[in-house]
Amino acid sequence: MKKLFLVSALLPAVMAFSQQHGGMWMPTELNEAEMKKLGMKISAKQIFDPSKPSIKDAVAQFDGGCTSEVISPKGLLLTNHHCGYDDIQRHSTVENDLLTNGFWAKNMNEELPNPGVTVDFIADIKDVTTEITAGTQGLSGENLEKKINQNIELYKNAQKIENYQKIIVKSMYYGNKYYAYIIDTYKDVRLVGAPPSSIGKFGSDTDNWVWPRHTGDFMLFRIYADKNNKPAEYSKDNVPFQPKHFLPISIKDKKEGDFTFVFGFPGRTTEYLPAVAVEKIMNETDPAMISMRDAALKILDEKMRTDDATRIKYASKYARVANYWKKWIGEVEGLKKSQAVQKKKQYEQQLIAKNPAIKPTIEQLNRLYNEQAPYALNRAYYLELLRNAETLTLANIYLGYLQNAKDGRADAQYLNRLKSHLKSFYKDYDAQLDAQVTAKLFVLYTEKTPKEFLPSGFKNDFKVSNQNTILESMEMFFSANSIITGRKAFNGSTVYSDIDKVFSDQKALLEALEKDPFITLMKDLKLVYSETTESKFTQYQTQIDRLQKTFMAQQMETDKERRFFPDANSTLRVAYGTIKGSDPRDGVKYNYQTHLKGVMEKYIPNDYEFNVPQKLISLYQNKNYGVYADKTGEVPVNFTATNHTTGGNSGSPVLDARGNLIGLNFDRQWEGTMSDINFDPRFSRNIMVDTKYILFIIDKFADSKWLIDEMKIVK
Ligand code: ARG
Ligand code: ASP
């Protein structure tokens, strides 16, 4: 308390310890007392119990990224529309455009299989710090890391697990603790229902990361298991999975102050970085990445708006690129506004005052981050170039093939994987459109990159000083010289029409690829990058990581008043808070809830972001809401709360005091997206789809009462 008092003289209401109000907690180590004080009516054991059915048995990681939850005794699975977006895109064509029209199976036979999609449940979590750090006393650096990895392998091999299970060991607090996870992976996951994009993605990129929000971002799948209810590969003989627990769905009205918790798989946060690291993100790497994506998105957007085939091809890719582009913009603003760097600096001084051993840690971190900065910046540009300039992405894939062939590693299995990867790449690739993107980003990259980080012969092929020349010369290559862009035929076929045929004469193909202009370009670029930038970056990063472990331990030893949670690392966590609006700016007050009338307020007929389906308009006009309206007489659509969430929490169940589902997490509000680095309870809010809206759409819009009948509704 005394400490809080001291700093409050220097800073507005919220202290360096604002994270105290956030947190993504291990489900095995919950702050039960505080949760109950906020209103929770169940016990921590009911949330996570490895030996008895508990809420965790209804929560699963969806396809390695998002979260999902089981909402019926027949394995019905709820997640976000944007989490299943790739799957629905894969089932879509211009003629049968499920993205635009939505999809609703009328019965189980109509559910669509999604090969490759997996759903992971956590069977158990164990603190294995003792086992993993055994025999590491006195070791440091590489020797320590080697020993730890050996211990992890030893531990994993010693465990008895079922053939459908796997174990992973995760480091927490930057290597100060280790936890083991036993995971059940289900592989037969079928698409059951998806609203049209004009509901599931309503507001699209304009509204993304923004409150007030009106998006029905949900989608339904079903998990299938073998006859013994165990995970199995897809088979039409599989049966609907019977979960140990499924979530009852509440359609009670919500009010501000109600307790909520989010149970899911947050991907990555970095809440314990030194001030200098935050400064670099805010002033250097985030702006660099933003500028590259800015350029790419503008070019794509123009064509997507006018051409349907391009829109479908690029829909998912565009959304993914735009998503973090916009998040970083919000993050930079939020870091500034929440004075994250100053707060961290002050916090560091307070820590040093209590524990002088922290001083050298901070000083070294400052030095390392400053020395690393030019490499980190170039790396940011390079990775964005490689990701967004698709022709270079392609060239890099082929470069891998050339290398593997040289090393004798291009066996049949590798080739099959490569060909199927390429087939799906070409399915969604428009060489002509990308010529513009690649040229533009390439110019930007060369402008932003110090000479010594660029290949010396560069200017021979592409005159960096003159943008038109680059564009022209690139387009020339696109139209004539390159096999990989599909403009030049090979073996009587092109990469678009028949990959198998192109690959049928490998010897000749390898020779031709060696001479491909884009592969040559990529090779030069990559070589210089890895020699000048990557190696240096990694050298520094290794040292930084080791020091960060020390710094983390020092923070935990020194700041006894703060409750620490491990940074998110795609493991199962619980965040809790209350339903709440916010006052993000002077003169602006956000309500905690939006309604269907707000959808209609945003409606722009036939707009690709704000169109509203006719049927929803009729339901609205006739006030045909059934049991799904709230006390205002309207159907609630989205709401906000103070839960600390991040990427990966999408699709997470949001539960009430009794463990009933009240919302589906899908986003955060713009003013608070710096929560990955500096959670600030004044601005950081998670955004959820109201369960009433989800059920309303399933019931009234999609006429899929058979799904509602499977669920347990709490009124
Ligand atoms: N911002 C949310 C999240 O990070 C939703 C993204 C999907 N929507 C989009 N327009 N890209 O994933
Ligand atoms: N939209 C994010 C997700 O996909 C959630 C977030 O970043 O708040 O996981």
Image (spheres, rainbow, N blue to C red):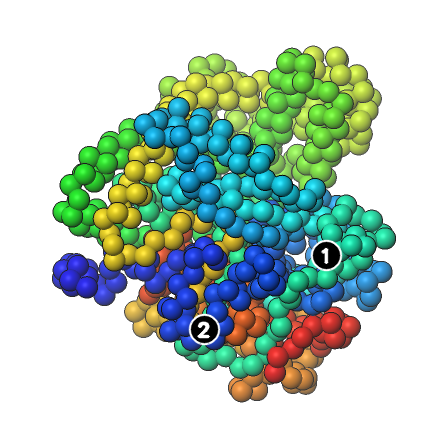
Q: Between disc 2 and disc 1, whose residue precedes?
A: 2
Residue topped by disc 1: 223
In the rendering, which numbered label is found on residue 349?
Answer: none
Q: Nearer the viewer, residue 538 or 207?
A: 538
Tell me the residue at 81%/20% (across/down): 504
Quadrant of the image occupied by residue 699 = bottom right
Asked if residue 420 is positioned above or below residue 556 in the image, the reply reads above
In the rendering, which numbered label is found on residue 40?
Answer: 2
Tell me the residue at 23%/36% (across/down): 361
Tell me the residue at 14%/47% (across/down): 353
- Classed neighbour count for the residue bearing mark 2: other residues with Cα under 10 Å, few (<14), some (14–19), many (≥20): many
Asked if residue 696 is positioned above or below residue 229 in the image, the reply reads below
Asked if residue 489 is positioned above or below residue 436 in the image, the reply reads above
Asked if residue 209 is positioned above or below residue 284 in the image, the reply reads below
Taking the image as shown, residue 404 lies to the left or right of residue 45, namely: right
Q: Nearer the viewer, residue 92 or 474?
A: 92
Q: Nearer the viewer, residue 181 or 354?
A: 181
Q: Secondary structure at mark 2?
A: loop
x, y percent for residue 255? 46, 80
x, y percent for residue 96? 79, 55
x, y percent for residue 288? 40, 39
Taking the image as shown, residue 254 lies to the left or right of residue 704, namely: left
Mark 1 CB within 8 Å of ligand 2: no
Whether residue 460 appears in this view of the structure is yes
Quadrant of the image occupied by residue 53 = bottom right
As shown in the figure, which amino acid type bears the numbered disc 1? Ile
Query: Looking at the rendering, in which quadrant would you find the N terminus?
Result: bottom left
